[in-house]
Amino acid sequence: MLHLINRMTQVAAWVAAALFAMIGFIVFYEVAMRHAFLAPTSWVEETARVLQIYGVFLAAAWLVGRREHIRITVLTAHLPPGVQTWLSRVVLLVIGAVAGISAWYGLGLMQFSIDIGQTTDTTLELPMWLLQGPVVAGLVLIVLQALATVIGSFRSPALLGGEQPRSEV
C-alpha cells in the first residue's frame, strides 16, 4: 500500500511537471501571437492560472513525501536525532490532519459549486469545480503521502529526511 501511495504521488508530480511546461508553451504562444501577429488570445491567461492550480496541488504531496517542502529547522537541528525523528513524525501527522480537514471542507465547497452551477467570472466561464477539484485531490494525496511517510519511517527513518535541508536560494 505504501508503495502504491508513493507511486501515485510520483505520477502526480510528473503530471504537474508537464503542466508547468505546458504553461510555458502557452505563454510563449500568447507572446508570439500578441507581438508578432498582433492577434492576442482570450484564453491563455485563465488557462495558465488553472494549470498552475493543478500543478501546485498535484506536486505538493510528492514534496511532502521527499520532505522538500518548507521546513524551519533553526531549533530542531539542535535536538538529538531520536527526538528529531519523533518530532518529524508528529509534524507529518499534523500536516496530514490539516490537509484532511481542508480537503473535507474543500469537497463541501466543490459540491456547493456544482449544486448552484457556479462558474468563473471570466470569458471562459469555467465551472468552479474544475478549479476546486485539483485542490481537493492534492490535499487527499498529501494526507495519504504524510501517513505513508510516517508508517514507512518506522522501517526506514531516513524517509523523514534527517539530514539538514539545503539552504540554496
Image (cartoon, helix red, strand yellow):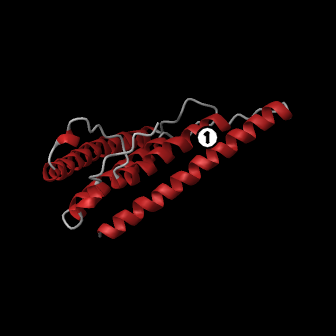
Closer to the camera in the image, 120 or 28: 28
Specify the quadrant of the image occupied by residue 160.
bottom left
Relative image position of residue 48 (x, y in whole percent): 60, 40
Q: Quadrant of the N terminus?
A: bottom left
Q: Nearer the viewer, residue 76 or 59?
A: 76
Most extreme residue toward the right, as rendered? 37
148 in relation to 32, above or below:
below
- Check disc 1: other Cα within 10 Å, few if <14, some if 14-19, many if 20+: some
Q: Residue 126 versus residue 139: which sits nearer the camera?
A: 139
Residue type at the position of mark 1:
Thr
Q: Residue at x 14, y 48 (%)?
A: 80
Check disc 1 and report its element: helix, strand or loop: helix
In-image side of 74 versus 80 (left or right)? right
What residue is pinned by disc 1?
A: 47
Rendered location of residue 131, percent (x, y): 48, 42
Figure check: 115 above or below 59: above
On screen, residue 151 versus residue 103, left or right, reads left
Report how many numbered discs are placed on residues in the image: 1
Q: Is residue 101 left or right of residue 51?
A: left
Q: Position of residue 59 (x, y in %)?
A: 45, 50
Residue 167: percent from the left, percent from the top? Answer: 40, 39
Q: Does residue 166 appear left or right of residue 155 in this picture?
A: right
Q: Residue at x 23, y 61 (%)?
A: 157
